[in-house]
Amino acid sequence: MRIIHTSDWHLGQYFYTKTRANEHQQFLNWLLQQIHDYQVDALIVAGDIFDTGSPPSYARELYNRFVVAIRETDCQLIILGGNHDSVATLNESKSLLACLNTTVVANVHTETPQPPIILHQKDNTPGALLCAIPYLRPRDMITSESGQSGTQKQQALKDAIADYYQCQFDEAVKLRQQLNVAIPIIATGHLTTIGASVTDSVREIYIGTLDAFSANLFPEFDYIALGHIHRPQVVNKSGHIRYSGSPIPLSFDESGQQKSVCLLDFEQDKLANITLLPIPEFQLLRTISGSLNEIEAELDKLKQQYDETNNTLWLDIEVATQDYLSDIQSRIQTLTQTPLFEVILLRRAKQQRQAFTQNEKETLTELSVYDVFERRLAQQEISSTETKERLTILFKQAVDMAEQEDNE
């Protein structure tokens, strides 16, 4: 039995107003090629198919075209809902996609749990049993009781999640006994496990109730395909519990990661091999920080490395300098005047921003509108990087609209 485990596609994401449509289309084309080349029996997508609950029409089109295309490979497709996904959006095409060898599990009903799914091999014989568990929303798992403390609510949710996994495992064991075949039992999950390494683009999903779930509470599945964390990694040093990670970098701090999908080979009921298939870098993202001289030197290195290609590098530039530079934006623009570079984010080092805020001689005439906004944002107690990025995007859009009106 051969399976690919992937997650966190985030179709429809806008990256500082930049669409990721081209990257996602290239990834899906690449993934189809891997399924064909490796003769994959089943593809598991462990949540966050879309970036928002109301994805743009082109993202839905990418999703639907992929479902149609994968059918030609005879590969069974399992789609799990994530915390970014809308249950209604995934369920609206669930019945139709079932006719295309695709199973969608958007949410859970504790009264009528999802039965284990039989994953078939190319010869149509059972190859594995899948406990298809999507993102477990607290409201689906527990009922709040008056008088409960925060600690009690955390424990109640943790116990409910652990019980749900155990019940799913028990049902899969019963089904395997009925089938009387030696096949593995696989589980999915879309959650944060204790010790997982997150990135800026990961949203905490159990805020106020449960920060992370202990991997020790999982039953003895033969493999656990996890989603939600974008950095590919093994959990608890257990090779059979893994986050596949996102297929493209969803924030600048993910730009140095080698993205991959997990190719799983099972022999009867044993996990025989795990191969990480490296995903090409379809859009180059780079973060540069330092003084202006250091930034210039780093840009020169990137020119030598990529200038003869047709690539465009999206840049996050953080300037660290003891001097106040009123023309920093124009100076960076001069350094990046080439089709190779596109500055997506330009910012001062945090410690420098704090120092400049205390400069009594500074006046508004010395600042750009972006400088003013950045400093006002820094004064707010906003811990979420995602929220800050969204506010920055909205502000940029507002400034662009105002400039367009002035030019008309």
Image (cartoon, rainbow, N blue to C red):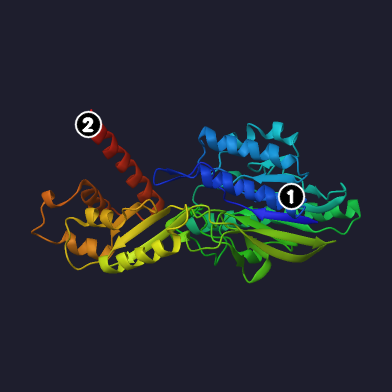
Of pointers 2 and 1, the one earlier in the residue sequence: 1
Q: Quadrant of the N terminus?
A: bottom right
Q: Secondary structure at mark 1?
A: helix
Given residues 89 and 145, the one toward you in this image is: 89
Q: Looking at the picture, does residue 233 appear above or below residue 17?
A: below
Q: Looking at the picture, does residue 368 appear above or below residue 347?
A: above
Residue that sits furthest to the right in the current view: 180
Left or right position of 316 against 105? left
Q: Image quadrant of residue 242? A: bottom right
Residue that sits furthest to the top in the current view: 408
Query: Which residue matches tag 2?
Result: 407
Left or right position of 268 against 255? right
Q: Position of residue 229 (x, y in %)?
A: 55, 57
Q: Image quadrant of residue 215? A: bottom right
Given residues 232 and 384, the one toward you in this image is: 232
Residue that sits furthest to the front in the current view: 308
Given residues 139 and 375, the one toward you in this image is: 375
Alpha-carbon span between mark 2 and mark 1: 53 Å
Q: Image quadrant of residue 93? A: top right
Query: Which residue matches tag 1?
Result: 36
Q: Secondary structure at mark 2?
A: helix
Residue at x-position 90% and y-position 51%: 178
Q: Quadrant of the C terminus?
A: top left
**Residue 48 is at least partly visible in this image:** no
Tell me the kind of residue under disc 2: Asn
Tell me the kind of residue under disc 1: His
Given residues 339 and 248, the one toward you in this image is: 339
Q: Position of residue 44 (x, y in %)?
A: 69, 50
- Rate crowding at label 1 as few (under 14), some (14 to 19) or many (20 or more) other CA atoms within 10 Å: some
